[in-house]
Amino acid sequence: MSPLDRLTELFRDFPGIGPRQARRFVYFLLAANPNYRRELAKLIETSAADIAQCESCFRYFPKDRQPSPFCRICKDPGRDQTSLMAVERDVDIESIERSGAFKGRYFVLGGTIPLASEEPEKFVRLRELRAAAERPELKEIVLGFSATTEGDHTRLLAEEWLKGVQEKGLRVTVLGRGLSTGSELEYADPETIKAAILGKK
Ligand SMILES: [Zn+2]
């Protein structure tokens, strides 16, 4: 396989990228300034060393000079420790933070669960979510998943996994209306997200 075909293949692994877009990326890079290519290659290589994954919420965060296993939000004593919002991906946290409507902490599930999957806990962090739900200070878990078929499916399975903790008094809520059907949290505007958080039930 030629290096160009291999590069195309690697871009195809990116979320939402088809073969034609992947090819366009390759041609874009070929035409790009050599300094741009060097910077990109270097950043890809060094980012793994500069980025850590939070041991509490599983989001990626830039390492500080003082290394910590926890991200800025998990370390912040000003955040509401009684409320945890589970989201699909890191990028959802950025959208919710922009809305300013949620003051609790987060949990990154790691994606959605495909409809016909036999062992959903192998696709996403359901086991870890249940463990997080057992923290004694926690009173509420908000399931902040996309208003898509897979998002709904993921919510139903997460609710099942949380049943035991729910029986012990934990409130499990979902985002309210406002997020239109088929919309992903990532693309929702701050006002819409705010309305969905205020309308959680
Ligand atoms: Zn964290």
Image (cartoon, rainbow, N blue to C red):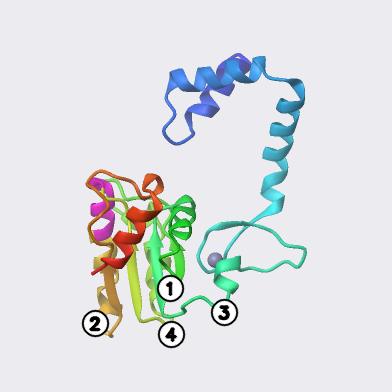
What distance separates the C-alpha of mark 4 from that of mark 1?
Answer: 10 Å
Q: Amino acid at mark 4?
A: Glu
Disc 1 versus disc 2: distance between alpha carbons? 15 Å
153 w.r.t. 80: above or below: above
- Does the Cβ of the disc 4 residue fall within 8 Å of ligand 1? no
Query: Is residue 44 something one can see in this rendering?
Result: yes
- Image: magenta residue range: 148-155
Residue bearing the label numbered 4: 137
Which structural element holds mark 2? helix
Residue located at (33% from left, 46% from top): 184
Reading the image, the residue beneath label 2 is: 167
Residue 77's disc is 3
Looking at the rendered image, the disc whose residue lies closer to the viewer, 1 or 3, is 3
Q: Which residue is mark 1?
A: 132
| Mark toward the start of the polypeptide (4 vs 1) | 1
Per the model, the C-alpha gap separating discs 2 and 3 is 28 Å
The quadrant of the rendered image in which ligand 1 is seen is bottom right
Can you say which quadrant of the picture contains the N terminus?
top right
> On the rendered structure, is 14 left or right of 69?
left
- The chief SS type of the magenta part is helix
Residue drawn at point x = 25 percent, y = 43 percent: 182
Dividing the picture into quadrants, the one containing residue 55 is bottom right
**Total of numbered circles in the picture?**
4
**Left or right of 95: which side holds 195?**
left
Task: Tell me the CA gap for discs 3 and 4.
Answer: 13 Å
- Residue 162, placed above or below residue 12: below
Q: Horizontal and vertical percent for residue 2?
A: 61, 13
